[in-house]
Image (spheres, grey):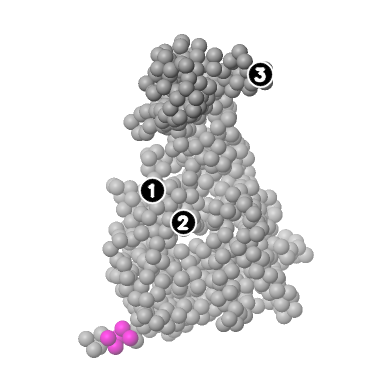
Amino acid sequence: MNISVSVAFLAAALVGSAGAFHGGGDCFPPSRPASAAGFANLLAQQPSSNIKSARLPLYKDAATTSTFTAYSSTSTSSTSLAALPNAAALTTAASQALFPTNAKPLTHLLRLTAAVVSTMLLLSAKLRRKLFYPNVTVDPSHDEPIPPGSLGCPFLGQPFFQSSKSFGAGSWYRDTAQKLGNPRVWKYYFLGKPLAVISGGDELKAVLNQEFDGVTSSGSEIMDSGLMPMDSLLFEGDKSRHSFLRRLVGQSLTPARVSDAVPVLQVAAHEAVRKMLDSTDGTVKMEKVCTDYTLDVAWRQILGLDLTEDEIPTFEKEVETWIKGMMSMRTLLRIAVKSSPGYKAMKYVTKKIEERIAQLKETGPDASNLSGMLFAKDEEDPKRTLTSQELIDNSLILIFAGSETSASTLTNAMLFLGLHPQAWNRLVEEQMTMKARHGDTLTKQALDDECPYLDAVIKESLRMRTVSGGIPRRTMKTIVVDGKQIPEGWLIDPSLLLTHTNDPKTQTDDGTSNVDPMTGFAPERWLDEKTRPDNDFVPFGSGPRFCLGYNLAMVEMKVFLATLARKISFQLDQQDNVEWQTGMGVMAQPADGVLVSVRSKEEEAALLEKA
């Protein structure tokens, strides 16, 4: 008998063992492994062993079929595969193949070890789990089951980062949750780590409010790749130090300081309008406009830089390169990160921050957020200030969080407003009333108190497409959420996106049209207490890590949309089919970048007058 038969038998045992574990999922279907007798019968149906390969079905169910390829040698065997009609014959033949009389003792030992391991894997589900899915534990002191969900391929897990043209970033989470019946808690596996996805306002807040006691940030373990600023409050795991960082960084983001920043934001918004109207053919990509605006805010307001016209494109390009680098597979897998373009770009931005810190120490404080952090004094210990590294890393976090998420939200808002011209017209009407009342100058108080529809447009855009996931937490002890145990050491993936999608206040019968760009966008829902989302609206997170830059982000977006509503008219180039980018990203963005045709209000009025 050819030795390939024994190799095929062991391969079947190994593959069957992996698939037998209940978490097999996308890689190995959760079906029974091939039995010895069944495998023998399959072999018996194949051509003789001088055929180089045969693709054999291991097991089959209604959903899927798994196969493997058994390779034989080129030599002709005196024993035909057809001579293996049952399990007993297979056992005898396998024994002869595994332990031929002319083999060396070491060969016997290796083959015996392989046979024993394969048998153990077939018989022990616990062993299979430990081997193929390390760290997937169950706390025996709790009666609750672990969350439902597939673990995917052994060792690798699930492709949680997958996105689709029909939904964009976060589509894997939505599709997987739907297959499971949209539970509030479910699990997946990735690179040796079991993760529990948590959604729902009550469930999410219950977990995130346990920060530092029941759960802690795991970002430093997962994202410490060289591109993320780890000395920032976003990743700080110590409760007292995190509180210290929030107190001092927070002094640069108070409502009063954000209010003082509005004139700077308005300058950046006017610059964005100028660039749009200067387009040679009147067509612009809103993704580019919104990104440039938020990066303009980054250097003008967050850092307080005074860049020349030649320096601005360089700064914006380096920041974009750094942020894209953070989202790349190269960084995720930590492959030569320090030689990557993203790392070099981060060093450029870091140098700019260091130069600005030195300048502020010489000239004194100004209205920038960096200045607010530099000169902040701790109320509990006035002598304690932020270190240089803490200043740099928290500045980087403000740039990353402020530019990436705000730019994506504004881009999506322009898409939604273009698809729903009645919403744009209502926004314009509100801003024209504001302009008649207060003139061209914008203030935080007026934007917050007198622009309810502007506020509704931004909140509805955040509801429709928010960040696909949050910073992972790690359980410090076994916790129970919605009747499911999440054992100590598991990671928690807080899903803001699923919380919004499955909000009972906006949910539809089909389960998806409430976030569909064509049918789901309804800013009016925010103007009525009966339809306004509340507990399940969490775009800025919850608990001790609630977004510290919330005030700045909201005002930044309000200033931009208010300025556009007063200055331009626009129309989408593509209105009947929305496709989304399929690459890795923090938030979903339209594939075409939202191409629009733009006119100034004056040009629009002249055309209407001629008509």
Q: Nearer the viewer, mark 2 or mark 1?
A: 2
Image quadrant holding the C terminus, namely bottom left
Q: Looking at this rendering, what residue extends furthest in the front direction?
A: 75
Give the SS element for disc 3: loop
**Real-space CA distance between mark 2 and mark 3, rounded to the nearest whole angstrom:** 53 Å
Q: Which residue is mark 1?
A: 502
Residue depth check, mark 2 versus mark 3: number of the one nearer the observer: 3
Q: Position of residue 207 (x, y in %)?
A: 54, 45
Residue sitting at the far right? 383
Compute the Cα span from label 1 to label 3. 63 Å
Residue at image coords 46%, 39%: 186
Q: Is residue 606 magenta?
A: yes
The numbered disc on residue 583 is 2
The location of residue 20, given as percent across then percent down, is 47, 27
Q: Residues within 10 Å of mark 3 (few under 14, many from 20)?
A: few
Mark 2 vs 3: CB contact within 8 A: no
Q: Which residue type does callout 3 highlight? A: Lys
Q: Which mark is residue 383?
A: none
Q: Foreground residue, 599 or 550?
A: 599
The tag earlier along the polypeptide, 2 or 1, is 1
* Residue drawn 36% across the image and 48% down it: 504
What amino acid is at disc 2?
Gly
Is label 2 in a helix, a strand or a loop?
loop
> What is the secondary structure assignment of the residue under circle 1?
loop
- What residue is shown with label 3? 104
Of 512 and 307, the residue lying toward us: 307
Pinpoint residue 217: horizontal percent, then vertical percent.
61, 48
Q: Give the percent coordinates (x, y) of residue 394.
A: 64, 63
Q: Which portion, as a residue range, is magenta? A: 603-607
Q: Residues within 10 Å of mark 2 (few under 14, many from 20)?
A: some
